[in-house]
Amino acid sequence: MPDFGPDQPEGCKGKIDFLFAISRLFTMKQETEALLSSFDGFMTTIKKDFADFDAHIMVANVDGEWTGSTCESVRCPEYYPDCGPNAEEYMCGSQGLTTICDSQMGAGILFNAGPHATNYPCELAGGRRYIVVKDEPDLNEQFKCIASVGTFGPDTPMMTGIAATVAPEINAEGGCNEGFLRPDALLVIVMVMDSADEKSIKTPAFWAEKVIAAKGGDLDAVVMAAIVNPLPEDPPKADCAYDDGIPKINPLRIFAEQFPHRVFGDVCGDTFVPTFAEAAELVKETCGAFIPQ
């Protein structure tokens, strides 16, 4: 009989590309803090399961703007404090530190500007717009730098932005995200948004197809962790801003449901630790079934 090789697939063996898509709306302060406080445990849990943990981590520009541009054109003439929790946190003239990638939808974020943002350019190893874990001695600090996106952004076309981040052109040689998305790595998408995505004009299924196509059509190559607002039938929660108009299903839920490997988290939760614990188990399970291209 011919030898068909081992019964079990090869698995990703710890080669994982993490894409964080975070809304920058004025309502997102609490959610960003919960994300930052949960990140270390999430990574630690995943790393312990893989002897060769080879990860890329990106926070993507999912709205196609550099939030400092408003500070420069409107606020800076009066040195208005909206460009940081304190006026001194954002210095006028910082636009000279940006490149075309800072305002390109889908590009990795290096320079967050505005209230509750980093307000200075992050310097990642190799001059990349994403973290290569093995090259960064202080992963938590570097993630905090790129993930402190602030609360000065527009309504977010989240699905459009995620699809733009994994598009072939932006990840190819010369693209803003050159080398981020690897064909033989598991893609883990973490999206955090406390309102409905009403700016991505086409259907959730359309945008999901774009993401799946970027992974060679392999549904086992993607894990989705959707931290979004509660279901319409859930009672509103105090001190949590989210779309509480006419009850309806958030398009982001429909988008996430297109991926068989998915977990949902409550964006109104005090912590995202339980969601990340569930996601880490799903990453481990999916990695074992993944057949690299």
Image: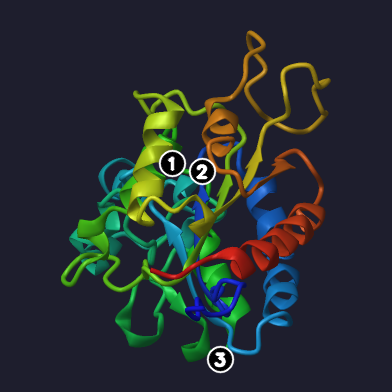
Q: Which mark is residue 23?
A: 2
Closer to the chain start, of discs 2 and 3, is 2
Answer above or below: position of 243 versus 147: above
Amino acid type of the residue that numbered disc 1 sits on in the rendered structure: Gly
- Where residue 204 appears, x then y in whole percent? 45, 29
Q: Which mark is residue 153?
A: 1
The quadrant of the rendering that contains the C terminus is bottom left
Q: Nearer the viewer, mark 3 or mark 1?
A: 3
- Where residue 253 appears, x then y in whole percent? 60, 31
Give the quadrant of residue 269. top right
What SS does tag 3 mark? loop
Residue linked to disc 3: 137
Closer to the chain start, of discs 1 and 2, is 2
- Where residue 178 appears, x then y in whole percent? 26, 71
Looking at the image, can residue 79 be seen? Answer: no
Identified at 39% across, 61% down, the residue is: 109
The residue nearer to you, when weighing 41 against 47, is 47
What SS does tag 2 mark? loop
Circles 1, 2 touching at the beta carbon (< 8 Å):
yes
Give the quadrant of residue 7. bottom right
What SS does tag 1 mark? loop
Q: Nearer the viewer, mark 1 or mark 2?
A: 2
